[in-house]
Image: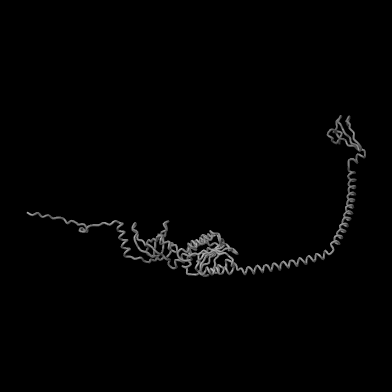
């Protein structure tokens, strides 16, 4: 007899017929990264920078956001050093880069290769940023700027050896004061490495100590062409110079950071050459004019003194006569003085006799002349006014009008 067995339905696992394969998190992130990079080509993204930070490595880490979304972004040091400006929070920028995944944390990031500010060019922004920074440090302060020497013996020029600016400056200096010594440092004034060469040129002229003033500049050009003179390194080299520096970059309407730091800004290289030395012809004319005025002044003074001398000569036509008059006057004054002295002596003598008589009348000696005497008790020489002061046997000295006597008290009443 057959047995019938009824089994309950058994749940089979999902994909029971498919062999299972497990991915690690790293493998998963790598797959996501590969998919993104293969499907999404490099692109431009616009947004606002926030939470920017720059660790010692020099990389930029920030968040790029708009009104509704945000994405983490990174710009590595190699690309960041090429920027003309410094990214900062709140700055609206255009970023060119690629989207990928930072597999260590699985973060979606925008890897930025280039960046431009929105609304104004990168160079203009960099100019304003550096200008604000250096002004805050005092590099533009007017009180630290030095006056140019009036007539420098030696002039240093830092510029391109090929440009027309150098030839114009040499021609003008030679026309104005041809015997000045000129030391030329030929440097690049635009393009890569130009700023470094300008810095070295200024430093070398200071190190050699052979110049009294330095002109640093070039002819006109676009903002990009003039940019070497907007570099921070050039500004600090001008600031550190022990020799006064004239900045002569571009045309009159062009302004660079070097203009603000330099001791004097010249609107053009030609103007710098005119500033650095005076015109010799003008100086010669000034000296001749001053010499003529001095000669006229000396002649006028001599004429004045001649007139004074002639007047004195007239007043001293006979010096011996004046001497005799003065001698006679001295004799007269001497006689008068002798007379006055004798008269005064007589007056004093009479007054002395009068006062002597009056003193004599009041003198105790005059009383003694009338028969009185003065008694002194010995040994203290005390004048005795009352007999009660004496004792029998006391020694006395009695003074008379003429002479003295010693006696002793034998009895008193």
273 or 325: nearer the viewer: 273
Looking at the image, the residue that sits furthest to the right is 370
**Quarter placement of the N terminus:** bottom left
Tell me residue 269's x, y (percent): 53, 68
Front-lying residue, 226 or 122: 226
Residue occupying image coordinates x 8% and y 54%: 2
Residue sitting farthest toward the left: 1
Give the image quarter of residue 289: bottom right
Front residue of 244 and 111 = 244
Instruction: Specify whether residue 164 is in view.
Output: yes
Up/down of 209 relative to 220, above or below: above
Figure quadrant of residue 11: bottom left
Pinpoint residue 228: horizontal percent, then vertical percent.
48, 65
Write the residue at 64% across / 68% down: 284
Q: Report the side of 358 relative to 250 (left or right).
A: right
**Count the marks: how many?**
0
Q: Nearer the viewer, residue 208 or 377?
A: 208
């Amino acid at each position: 007899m057959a047995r019938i067995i009824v089994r309950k339905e058994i749940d089979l696992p999902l994909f029971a017929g498919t062999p299972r394969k497990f991915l690690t998190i790293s493998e998963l992130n790598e797959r996501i990264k590969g998919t993104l990079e293969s499907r999404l080509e490099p692109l431009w993204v616009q947004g606002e920078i926030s939470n920017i930070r720059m660790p010692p490595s020099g990389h930029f880490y920030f968040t790029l956001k708009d009104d509704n979304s945000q994405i983490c972004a990174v710009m590595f040091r190699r690309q960041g050093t090429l920027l003309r400006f410094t990214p900062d929070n709140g700055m609206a920028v255009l970023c060119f880069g690629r989207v990928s995944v930072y597999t260590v944390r699985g973060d979606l990031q925008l890897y930025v290769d280039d960046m431009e500010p929105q609304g104004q060019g990168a160079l203009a922004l960099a100019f304003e940023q550096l200008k604000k920074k250096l002004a805050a440090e005092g590099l533009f302060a007017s009180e630290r700027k030095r006056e140019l020497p009036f007539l420098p013996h030696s002039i240093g020029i830092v510029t391109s050896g090929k440009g027309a600016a150098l030839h114009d400056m040499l021609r003008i200096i030679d026309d104005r004061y041809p015997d000045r010594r000129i030391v030329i440092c030929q440097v690049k004034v635009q393009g890569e490495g130009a700023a470094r060469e300008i810095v070295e040129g200024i430093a070398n002229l200071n190190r050699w100590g052979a110049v009294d003033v330095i002109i640093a500049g070039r002819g006109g050009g676009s903002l990009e062409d003039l940019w070497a003179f907007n570099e921070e390194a050039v500004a600090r080299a001008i600031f550190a110079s022990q020799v006064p520096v004239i900045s002569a970059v571009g045309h009159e309407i062009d302004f660079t950071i070097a203009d603000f730091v330099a001791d004097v800004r010249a609107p053009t290289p030609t103007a710098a050459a005119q500033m650095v030395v005076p015109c010799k012809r003008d100086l010669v004319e000034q000296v001749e004019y001053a010499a003529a005025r001095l000669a006229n002044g000396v002649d006028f003074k001599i004429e004045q003194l001649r007139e004074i001398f002639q007047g004195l000569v007239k007043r001293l036509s006979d010096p011996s006569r004046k001497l005799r008059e003065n001698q006679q006057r001295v004799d007269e004054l001497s006689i008068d003085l002798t007379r006055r002295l004798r008269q005064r002596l007589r007056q004093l003598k009479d007054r002395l006799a009068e006062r002597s008589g009056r003193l004599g009348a009041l003198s105790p000696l005059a009383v003694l002349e009338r028969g009185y005497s003065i008694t002194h008790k010995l040994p203290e020489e005390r004048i005795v006014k009352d007999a009660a002061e004496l004792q029998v046997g006391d020694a006395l000295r009695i003074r008379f009008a003429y002479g003295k006597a010693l006696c002793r008290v034998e009895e008193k009443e």
